Amino acid sequence: MDGARIAALDELSTDDTHLFRVRSVGDGDRPGDDADEREAICIRLADEDGPTDDVACWLNVCQHMTHIPLDKGSGAPVRGGEILCANHGAMFEADTGRCTYGPCEGAVLTEVGVRVAGGDVYLADENYEYVGPGPVDTDDDRSSDSNVIL
């Protein structure tokens, strides 16, 4: 639903991601059905002068292995303006979602539309409704053995 508040802008970091849950709309989902509940991440963008009032938001899946989340619940690390997939080292530009390094180089994260108003970040994507803070409750083990050292 457009307009749902995700977080205060000042709560968002440029060094890691903020995790929340969304649900697709328009698929005939029954109210309360969490079958299509997904995680999304947002990050406050920065320029050479520091944090800006711009925010980028993406579905929380690496494009190399889409069952692997970028943010496992404690924030995905960000290095030099790029979100790092800690499993296999893929690097995604925080502002465009494009993978610049790793096994899915050239792939792009799926954007979730947001807007900033009055110091708060709101969901502004007609394809999703805000469910709440993340992560999605699941018994699935979405981890992966990795040789990436943070």
Image (cartoon, rainbow, N blue to C red):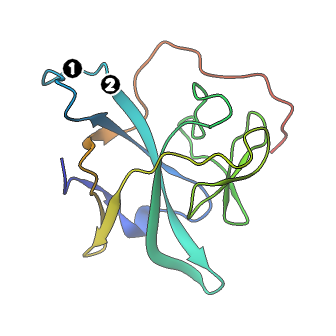
Does the residue at mark 2 contact the one at mark 1 (Cβ under 8 Å)? yes
**Residue that appears at 58% across and 65% down:** 14
In the rendered structure, the answer to whether residue 44 lies left or right of residue 76 reads left
| Numbered disc 1: secondary structure | loop
The residue identified by callout 1 is 33
**Residue that appears at 56% across and 64% down:** 95
Image quarter in which the C terminus is found: top right
**Residue that appears at 81% across and 28% down:** 146
User: What amino acid does circle 1 point to?
Assistant: Asp
User: What amino acid does circle 2 point to?
Assistant: Asp
Answer above or below: position of 98 versus 34: below
The residue identified by callout 2 is 36
Q: Residues within 10 Å of mark 2 (few under 14, many from 20)?
A: few
Answer above or below: position of 106 versus 72: below
What is the quadrant of residue 22 in the picture?
A: top left
What is the quadrant of residue 89 in the picture?
A: top right
Residue furthest left as drawn: 31
Relative image position of residue 102 (x, y in whole percent): 79, 44
Say which of 60 and 64 sits in front. Answer: 64
What is the quadrant of residue 67 in the picture?
A: top right
Residue furthest bottom as drawn: 49
Relative image position of residue 96 (x, y in whole percent): 56, 61
Question: CA gap, disc 2 to disc 1?
Answer: 7 Å
| Numbered disc 2: secondary structure | loop
Residue furthest front as drawn: 106
Relative image position of residue 37 (x, y in whole percent): 33, 28
Answer above or below: position of 57 versus 143: below
Relative image position of residue 118 (x, y in whole percent): 25, 76
In the rendered structure, the answer to whether residue 43 lies left or right of residue 136 reads right
- Disc number for residue 101: none
In the rendered structure, the answer to whether residue 81 lies left or right of residue 24 reads right
Q: How many marks?
A: 2
